Image: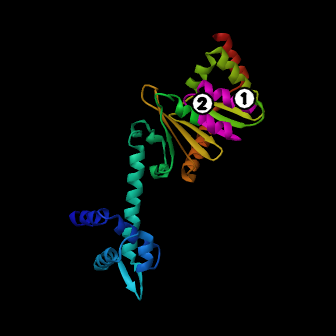
Amino acid sequence: MESALEEIEFLALSENRVEVLTLLSDGRHTRPELEAETGASQATLGRILSDFQDRSWARQDGSDYVATATGTLVAQGFNDLLDILETERELRGLVRYLPTHAMDFDLRHLADATITTPTQTRPNAPVQRLLDLVEDATEVRAFSHAFNEQNLSVVERRASAGELSFSGVLSRSAVEALASDADLRERLVSLLSAPEATVRVREEGIPLAVTIADGTVHLLLRDETGVLRASIDTDSEAVRSWAIETFDHYWRTATELTVSDLAGSDESS
């Protein structure tokens, strides 16, 4: 373990070493090419290439240098570690709010995600990010334990105008919360009457708040008390595949919500 850590330290202490090994793992390079790519001096490159050859990470072939099989392995592994740490730094403040037990994908796929957090001047920024995505989409699929007034308003308006195809799976508690408010119940009835809108109810509950707006996946993150902490959205194909598969599962295990169901709620309220 100690010798492996020493090799990691050897690479980590020099950005030039990492860059040169990565370049050589991608293909042959001459020293002038490496100098142009990295900005390192010829003296620095000489030391780096000599160290790599001592470790059998690189070999010289005429005027070219190229990574060996083990050098390529080290370059790939080290860059994977860098990707993991960069993603961890992005998610560090949010990890306690991530429903990772229900997120069946490699978190590295969130490396390039857009993270939106509330601020003093924009406390509703995560929800606004969602509304912006829904406003621009032509197809929205959602599964959630909650459906806030703003989101419902945008979805209902655009679906009623024929601008949006909407499919949603909501928890029973989310539907009951909407049905208990006369204005929100009216909007939900209007949504159900839209030509390209269907809502289903899942009795078992839904631990996530996920919206698929065309090709973008958006997650709202709340703490254990229900306070909105952040949102994450990404165009990652892997995350999108997970979201669609999860949506399909919830869709199959839910029952359709009808206007008559809400009429019953109206009479009992």
What's the residue at 39%, 57% (across, down)? 82
Is residue 51 shown to the viewer in this render?
Answer: yes
Is residue 56 shown to the viewer in this render?
Answer: no
For label 2, the crowd category at 10 Å Cα-Cα, with few meaning under 14, some 14 to 19 and many 20 or more, is many
Q: Quadrant of residue 91?
A: top left
Q: Nearer the viewer, residue 74 or 144?
A: 74
Taking the image as shown, residue 174 lies to the left or right of residue 27, namely right
Check the picture and name the quadrant holding the N terminus: bottom left
Magenta residue check for 158: yes
Q: Position of residue 83 (x, y in %)?
A: 42, 56
Where 214 sits versus 144, above or below?
below
Q: Quadrant of residue 84?
A: bottom left
Residue at the farthest bottom position: 62
Q: Amino acid at mark 2?
A: Leu
- The residue wearing badge 1 is 157
Whichever of labels 1 and 2 marks the residue nearer the N terminus, that label is: 1
Which type of secondary structure does the marked residue at label 1 adopt?
A: helix
Labelled disc at residue 170: 2
Where 77 sits versus 192, above or below?
below
Closer mark to the observer between disc 1 and disc 2: 1
The rendered magenta stretch, by its main secondary structure, is classed as helix
Taking the image as shown, residue 50 lies to the left or right of residue 35, namely left
- Which range of residues does the magenta coloring cover? 130-159
Q: Nearer the viewer, residue 118 or 107?
A: 118
Inter-mark Cα distance, 1 to 2: 19 Å
Q: Nearer the viewer, residue 161 or 167?
A: 161
